[in-house]
Image: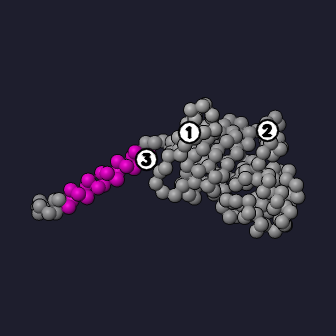
Amino acid sequence: MLELSRSQAVVYGAVAVALLLVGARAMRTEGDGGAPSIAAAATPKGDASGFSLKASGGPDVVVDVSGAVRRPGVYRLPVGSRVVDAIARAGGPAGDALLEGINRAARLADGQQVMVPARGPGGVAASSGAASEEGPISLGSATVEQLETIDGIGPVTAGKIVEYRDQHGGLSSVEQLDRVSGIGPATMESLRGRLQP
């Protein structure tokens, strides 16, 4: 049988304790069940738009997942996460989700809104035109059809924007669109008013 000196036993014991601590931390992280590390809490006056962020270590992006998902909300995800990860964090797609309407492989940018369209009558997106008239369109999840509703954007330019976004892993600001051919200064002004990151 192998005999250990006292110093070797202490070293092996310290290594075993360190491994146990690392394992316990990994199990605790998995035990969260993918729960977001952002607490959505109503403000004292009952304003449902109020929330607070709990800082957690490491580089993260904070995204707003809305539309046809099971648990819409604001979530913190690791840098490099994809739209599909944000949808999963929001409980997955709802039964009426039109997943073909978004690029699930696009990388997430901090502050991005991920809007999952809902399937309406006849299998088409229920609110693609109406939502564009009500407020800004999310640059991270806008479809070609939604981009075409902006003055100065036709089907070709809208396609180029979506292609550029997909090739570069998303867009974090409207200003990045000046790199897309066919977008001049006048179009950029139109885009600033109608798009959000």
Residue 110: image quadrant is bottom right
Q: Are marks 1 and 2 in contact (CB under 8 Å)?
A: no
Q: Which residues are magenta?
A: 11-30
Q: Are marks 3 and 1 in contact (CB under 8 Å)?
A: no
Q: Residue at x 81, y 34 (%)?
A: 121
What residue is shown with label 3? 29
- Which kind of residue does numbered mark 1 sit on? Ala
- The numbered mark, 3 or 1, whose residue comes first in the sequence reads 3
Which of discs 3 and 1 lies nearer the camera? The answer is 1
- The numbered mark, 1 or 2, whose residue comes first in the sequence reads 1
Say how many tags the image has: 3
In this rendering, would 111 be left or right of 122? left
In this rendering, would 60 be left or right of 96? left
SS of the residue under disc 3: helix
What residue is shown with label 2? 126
SS of the residue under disc 1: loop
- Which kind of residue does numbered mark 3 sit on? Thr
What residue is shown with label 1? 40
Res 60 label: none
How far separated are the C-alphas under marks 3 and 1?
20 Å
